[in-house]
Amino acid sequence: PRLLVLISGNGSNLQALISATTSSPPTLPARIIHVISNKKAAFGLTRAANANIPTTYHNLVPYKKQHAGDIAAARRAYDAELARLILEQKPDMVVCAGWMHIFSDAALQPLVEAGVGIINLHPALPGQFDGAGAIERAYEAFQKGEIGGTGIMVHWVIGEVDRGEPIVVREVEMVEGEGLAELEERIHKVEHVEIVNGTRMALERLVREREAAGRT
Ligand code: GRF
């Protein structure tokens, strides 16, 4: 199967997917065909290039200029082009791995209509800390005694941010007196394992759904 990975930063989860798809034998039987970043400086672009994976930097700025004053229109135009960029690569599935851009329907609709699955990795438990800064928010809640632990999940992407059906959920224990950096490090280690498992499980689900559709 053909994976297209979306990134915005370091790309450590992309790296986990690269390793899993290029090991012999591959722990993840799939091919990363393209990487798209919304940030020019994303180190993940370097990781992809080092793995001979084609990359695209999709820049929001020209859209903001073109639709000056109407950020919603700019994002819709950006997202429509993003969907086109994705579909022209003919992926089976899109993996959002450290992708920090909320899709509008302009991006999701064309992908859904094309039957392309979209999954996202989020460093929190379902419904706990949706959106950005999830780890920091969990850390603060733990300091206040509001939560006893946190976790990560890989989920299907729908219109609502970080709200799609979970594919894999892993709890991460929290430790009194541990610093934020240590918690982040432990969470990222769990992510690097679960991004591979979640992608594998999502692909298996897609294949089952296509077979079922083929049978009807
Ligand atoms: C990860 O916690 C990911 O879940 C979040 O961004 C962080 C950085 O990911 N969305 P990466 O190192 O860029 O893969």
Image: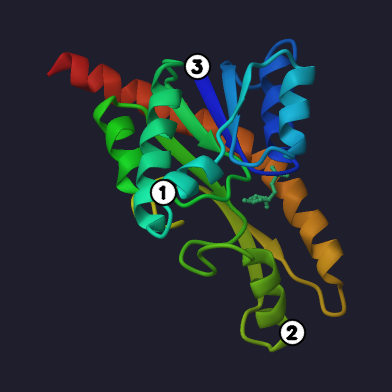
- Give the residue type at disc 2: Gln
From this view, report whether residue 195 is shown above or below residue 169.
above
**What is the C-alpha distance between the residues marked 3 and 2?**
42 Å
From this view, report whether residue 42 is shown above or below residue 149.
above
Q: Quadrant of residue 85?
A: top left
- Give the residue type at disc 1: Arg
* Left or right side of 101 for 98: right
Label 1, on which residue?
75
Q: Secondary structure at mark 1?
A: helix
| Residue 105 in the image, given as x and y percentages of width and height | 30, 46
- Give the residue type at disc 3: Arg
**What is the C-alpha distance between the residues marked 1 and 2?**
36 Å
Q: How is the image coloured?
A: rainbow
Asked if the residue under mark 1 is in contact with the one under mark 3, i.e. CB atoms within 8 Å, the reply is no
* Left or right side of 95 for 103: left
Q: Which mark is residue 143?
A: 2
Instruction: Please tell me which residue lies in front, 197 or 68.
Output: 68
Q: Quadrant of residue 72?
A: bottom left
Label 3, on which residue?
2
Q: Label 1: few (<14), some or many (≥20) within 10 Å?
A: many
Nearer the camera: disc 1 or disc 2: 1
Q: Quadrant of residue 79?
A: top left
Q: Label 2: few (<14), some or many (≥20) within 10 Å?
A: some
Instruction: Please tell me which residue lies in front, 51 or 55.
Output: 55
- Looking at the image, tell me whether mark 3 or mark 2 is earlier in sequence order: 3
Nearer the camera: disc 3 or disc 2: 3
Identify the residue at horizontal 22%, vertical 21% (top origin). Answer: 212
**What is the C-alpha distance between the residues marked 3 and 1?**
26 Å
- Looking at the image, tell me whether mark 1 or mark 2 is earlier in sequence order: 1
